Image (cartoon, helix red, strand yellow):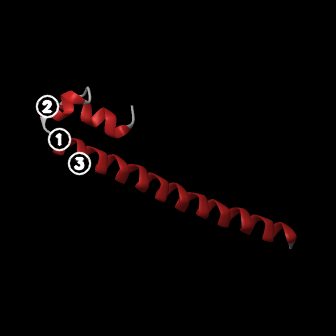
Amino acid sequence: MSTIELNRSVAVGGVGNVVANFFSMLSTWNDARVTRRELSRLSDRELDDIGLCRGDIERIARGF
């Protein structure tokens, strides 16, 4: 009987990890979305002041 209980706890932990990974991915996606939106609102002059151009926005938003 203890083997069945052990397997059940591992299975539940697995589901918990899947849920945690989902929310982590969702949070990462949202952070990139907010960064992309805010950088897109800047003028070309403001982007140049911080050393960026419009083509850099996606790369910066993804964290590369």
Residue type (three-letter) at the residue carrying disc 1? Leu
Q: Report x, y in % for residue 11.
A: 67, 64
Q: How far apart are marks 1 and 2 (CA)?
A: 8 Å
* Mark 2 closeness class: few <14, some 14–19, many ≥20 residues within 10 Å: few
Residue at point 48% right, 57% down? 22
Residue at point 86%, 70% (across, down) = 2
Task: Give the residue type at disc 3.
Answer: Arg
- Give the labeled residue for mark 2: 45
Q: Tell me the CA gap for discs 2 and 3.
A: 17 Å
Three-letter code, disc 2:
Arg
Q: 42 above or below 10?
A: above
> Which of these two is toward me, 12 or 1?
12
In the rendered view, does 4 fall on the left or right side of 62? right
Judge from the rendering whether residue 16 lies leftward or rightward of residue 23; answer left or right. right
Q: Where is residue 36 in the image (x, y as percent from the top left)?
A: 26, 44
Q: Residue furthest right?
A: 2
Q: Do the residues labelled 2 and 3 touch (CB within 8 Å)?
A: no
Q: Observer-nearest residue: 30 or 5?
A: 30
